[in-house]
Each structure stands twice: as structure tokens, then as C-alpha cells.
Image (cartoon, rainbow, N blue to C red):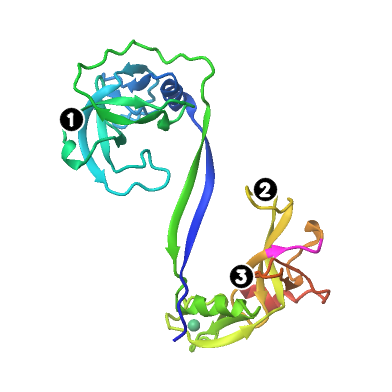
């Protein structure tokens, strides 16, 4: 049995979002060390604020300042802080109902250990030294035994309001492609494409997933396909991806390798983007040391007949 591969995999992208009037005031307020909520028509104060009443769905815009002090309503201890979390020492995740609010805000509580945390604990905001208009402007909460702070009655009107944020989204995990794809990836190291054939319908899957999704049967017969193939469908990419050194516009397509019954995808280059077409015959282009083709380029052969790839779109 060949070794099943395993490797760390990080999927990461910056997510830019506009804030709208309520979140904009909330985050601008944090920058100015003011915590704002919204007041519903029945008089409840929601912190963090939302734009629509969760009970009546009514639009709410009535901003109200609450105190930077409050009470822990529930909590969980975090033994091992991970990258990007509010504190780099063990801390408690807490829901805090700030004085003057009717709902609770999720944040971190700096405490020496779980024995120092309890529901009902009084806490206050510890402000970050540098504030930019983000939830991290609250560095964390800390235990507090003084009186509730008195909010100054801020109306939510600010100069230079924050209108958008960029929130990095990141998934960080260990990925194992399984037996079939491990064999596929190992073959790619020799610049060969190895798929697997279904024992019933005879379809050859590339990359193989270990089973035929149509017949529900395990696949094991290995079949080498390609290296040439046919563009079955494609798109023109006009948005430049961060950290990707490819000039736009470029073409990304589905390519059915010769002998395969499933198209895989790849970039198509070596031809002006507006001349790429369905049926174009292509071959892989490898760069030194790469584990998969950098792109596919035209072979110069006549285009494939539509009937030969119409099932592979
Ligand atoms: Zn099958």
C-alpha cells in the first residue's frame, strides 16, 4: 500500500466589506473609546448593534451609548490561544452584557486562570493603544470591581467615520487527499497523469477520488491519461488575485485530458485570451521543480469535434 500523503494547507483571503450606518457608527465609536448600541422601539438596547430588530425585523437606527463596564453572562476557557486571537496567553472567551445593554457582546477576558472567571463577574473594557475602527480596538476585557461607568450620552455622530473593514478569512488545517489522490499526486511528480477507471461504467476519473460517483463503486484500476487534452469550457479572469503574479485578463479552463472522462482545470496561456475557444487542443507546460503544470498551451492541432467532449463540460 503506497503512502497516503498529508500536508498543512492554508486557505486564506482578505474579505473587504462595507459597514452600513449602524456598524460604521459602532466601529468608529470603538476608535473613539465609545461603545454604541441601538435602541429598539420597545426600549431594548442591543450591543453589538444590528440594523434590524431581531424580533420584529423593523429597521433600527437609534444609536445609544452604553458603559464600558459590564457583567459576564457566560464564558469558556481557552487553554491554547491560536494565531490571530485577542491575547497570546490563555484567556476566557466571554459574553459580556455591558451596563445599559440588554444583549451581550462576545470578546476575550484577560484572567490568570479559569478559577478567576465566573458568570456574574464584573468586567471593564481594556482599550487597545492603537485604534483603527475595529472590534480589536477593545483589546480585551479585564476584571473590575468599581462602580458601573456612566456613559457620556454620545449620539453616534463622528468626524471621519469608518465605512469599511478588511477582515482576513483563514482556514488552517492538515489535509490528506486519501489513497487515490495520493497516487495521482505522486505520479504528477514524474509529470504523469494517472486516473482511475470505474469497474462498472468504465469512466476514467482524473483526478481520481477513489470511487465512481455515478455507480457508487470503489475504483482501483489505474490508467495513465494525457498529457494532451481538449478545452471543454473556460472563463476569462479579469480580477487580479492578491499574491498571484499573473497579469489579467487571463483564461482559466476545464481541460479533458485524452483518455479521461472528467475535466480538470488549469490556466490556458500561449494564446491571446480572446482566441481561446471550446475544443482547443492543449498540452501542459511545466516549470522546473513544479509538482503540477504551470499552464496549458495550444498544441497547434485542429480543434476537437464537439461530440468528442460534449459529455465533459
Ligand atoms: Zn461508474
Q: Residue at x 43, y 83 (%)?
A: 217
Residue 202, position as x, y percentages in the image: 54, 87
| Position of 114 relative to 96 (above/below) | below
Residue 44, position as x, y percentages in the image: 26, 22
Give whichever of discs 3 and 2 has the lower sequence position. 2
Picture quadrant where residue 77 is located: top left
Q: Is residue 149 left or right of residue 264?
A: left
Residue tagged 3: 264
Give the quadrant of the C terminus: bottom right
- Would you say the magenta stretch is mainly helix, strand or loop? loop
Frontmost residue, 160 versus 79: 79
**Real-space Cα distance between discs 3 and 2?**
22 Å
Label 1's element? loop
Mark 3 is surrounded, within 10 Å at the Cα level, by few (under 14), some (14 to 19) or many (20 or more) other residues, namely some
Figure disc tally: 3
**Real-space Cα distance between discs 1 and 2?**
49 Å
Q: Nearer the viewer, mark 1 or mark 3?
A: 1
Frontmost residue, 258 versus 202: 258
Label 2's element? loop
Frontmost residue, 231 versus 244: 244
Amino acid at each position: 500500500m503506497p503512502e497516503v500523503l498529508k500536508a498543512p494547507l492554508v486557505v486564506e483571503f482578505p474579505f473587504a466589506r462595507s459597514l452600513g450606518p449602524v456598524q460604521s457608527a459602532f466601529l468608529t465609536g470603538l476608535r473613539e473609546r465609545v461603545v454604541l448600541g441601538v435602541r429598539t422601539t420597545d426600549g431594548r438596547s442591543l450591543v453589538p448593534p444590528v440594523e434590524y430588530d431581531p424580533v420584529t425585523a423593523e429597521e433600527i437606527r437609534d444609536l445609544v451609548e452604553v458603559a464600558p463596564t459590564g457583567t459576564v453572562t457566560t464564558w469558556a476557557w481557552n487553554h491554547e490561544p491560536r494565531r490571530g486571537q485577542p491575547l497570546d496567553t490563555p484567556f476566557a472567551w466571554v459574553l459580556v452584557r455591558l451596563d445599559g445593554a440588554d444583549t451581550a457582546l462576545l470578546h476575550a477576558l484577560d484572567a490568570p486562570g479559569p478559577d478567576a472567571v465566573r458568570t456574574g463577574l464584573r468586567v471593564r473594557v481594556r482599550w487597545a493603544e492603537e485604534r483603527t475602527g475595529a472590534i480589536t480596538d477593545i483589546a480585551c476585557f479585564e476584571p473590575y470591581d468599581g462602580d458601573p461607568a456612566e456613559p457620556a450620552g454620545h449620539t453616534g455622530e463622528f468626524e471621519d467615520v469608518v465605512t469599511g473593514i478588511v477582515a482576513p478569512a483563514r482556514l488552517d488545517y492538515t489535509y490528506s487527499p486519501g489513497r487515490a489522490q495520493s497516487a495521482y499526486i505522486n505520479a504528477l511528480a514524474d509529470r504523469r497523469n494517472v486516473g482511475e477507471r470505474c469497474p462498472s461504467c468504465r469512466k476514467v476519473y482524473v483526478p481520481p477520488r477513489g470511487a465512481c460517483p455515478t455507480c457508487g463503486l470503489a475504483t482501483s484500476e489505474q490508467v495513465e491519461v494525457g498529457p494532451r487534452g481538449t478545452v471543454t469550457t473556460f472563463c476569462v479572469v479579469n480580477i487580479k488575485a492578491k499574491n498571484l503574479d499573473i497579469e489579467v485578463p487571463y483564461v482559466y479552463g476545464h481541460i479533458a485530458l485524452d483518455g479521461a472522462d472528467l475535466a480538470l482545470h488549469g490556466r490556458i496561456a500561449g494564446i491571446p485570451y480572446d482566441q481561446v475557444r471550446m475544443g482547443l487542443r492543449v498540452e501542459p507546460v511545466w516549470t522546473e521543480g513544479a509538482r503540477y503544470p504551470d499552464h496549458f498551451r495550444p498544441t497547434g492541432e485542429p480543434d476537437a469535434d464537439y461530440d468528442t467532449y460534449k459529455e465533459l463540460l
